[in-house]
Amino acid sequence: MIKVAIVDDGTEAAESTRSMVEKCAGRLLKSGKAEIHVFNRSELIACELREGTYFDIFLLETKMPVINGLDLAKYIRSIQKEGYIVFLTSHPEFAVESYYKSIRAYQYILKDTMKKRLPEVLDDIFEQCIREEDQYYYIFNQYRTERIRFHDIIYVKKDGKNCILAAKDGIHTDRTTIMKVKQALNLPIFILIDRGSIVNVEHIEKICKKEVHMNNGDMLEISRANVRTVRDKVHQYWGVSL
């Protein structure tokens, strides 16, 4: 699901943007693979983000009351390192700042060029989102939806009825089985080291006897039956021939 957030305090401008997004995402909207959410106040989307809502694309006006577009973008980045931020504005003076590390805008589009440029930019973003869709692990529960980039997952460990996913941004919990997680993590970088643990080879620092040391400082045990298999797969990934 590709979620688009339009944030503009001008009702007419917001509806015009929505119309353009609908034309670009027509096929995705009809198939239920995209959603458009419009916010006429920046603090409303800030509240959604605090509650764990994830958006893939942000279309932001720069000049807004309470929280302006640049400050909102910084807040977005403090919560979401991923996601495409596009500014739609009549104010060219903020363009340079929009590309700073704290914001990392994808594009800065002036509204007098929007009819031509926005469809081109959205086509590129939707194409990238579709390519990236299978590269995330999704957690769904009654409170929130989370997604974690495969390459950011360090390891997964069974904990009672839950699975704990240790990732670069912290710990995530999913109420599921370890085998369902393994099926979802359909890349060769993930190795089952025992019945209750999966590790990402990209994040292994070393293997010492029956222990795998991860680059976040955690250590996991390899089952006796899996020691040779794990070592072989790790050496293969590292390009080491023994």
Image (cartoon, grey):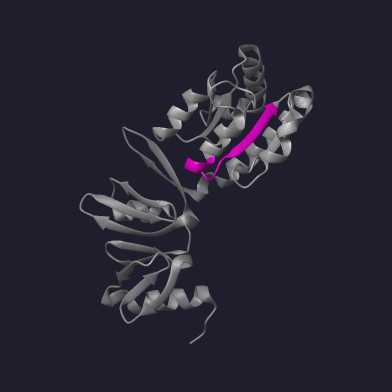
Question: In the displayed structure, does residue 170 sit left or right of residue 222?
Answer: right
The mark tally for this picture is 0
Q: Position of residue 117 (x, y in %)?
A: 76, 30
Q: Quadrant of residue 108?
A: top right
In the image, farthest residue toward the bottom: 242
Where is residue 197 drawn, in percent x and y? 31, 63
Q: Looking at the image, which residue sits at the far left?
A: 160
Q: Against 213, is 179 above or below?
A: above
**Residue placed most toward the observer, 8 or 172:** 8
Along the horizontal axis of the image, is 192 left or right of 76? Answer: left
Q: Position of residue 105 (x, y in %)?
A: 65, 40
Say if 49 sits above or below 39 in the image.
below
Q: Quadrant of residue 119?
A: top right
Asked if 29 appears above or below 154 in the picture, the reply is above
In this view, 237 is above or below 97: below
Which residue corresponds to the image point at 61% horizontal and 13% vertical from the top-left?
11
Q: Is residue 74 located in the magenta-colored stretch of the structure?
A: no
Determine the residue positioned at 31% across, 32% down: 142
Residue 163 position within the rendered picture, expressed as x and y whole percent measured from the top left: 29, 52
Residue ID at (33%, 77%)? 227
Q: Nearer the viewer, residue 48 or 74?
A: 74
x 71%, y 33%: residue: 94
Q: Is residue 201 left or right of residue 57?
A: left
- Residues in magenta, as a range: 77-88
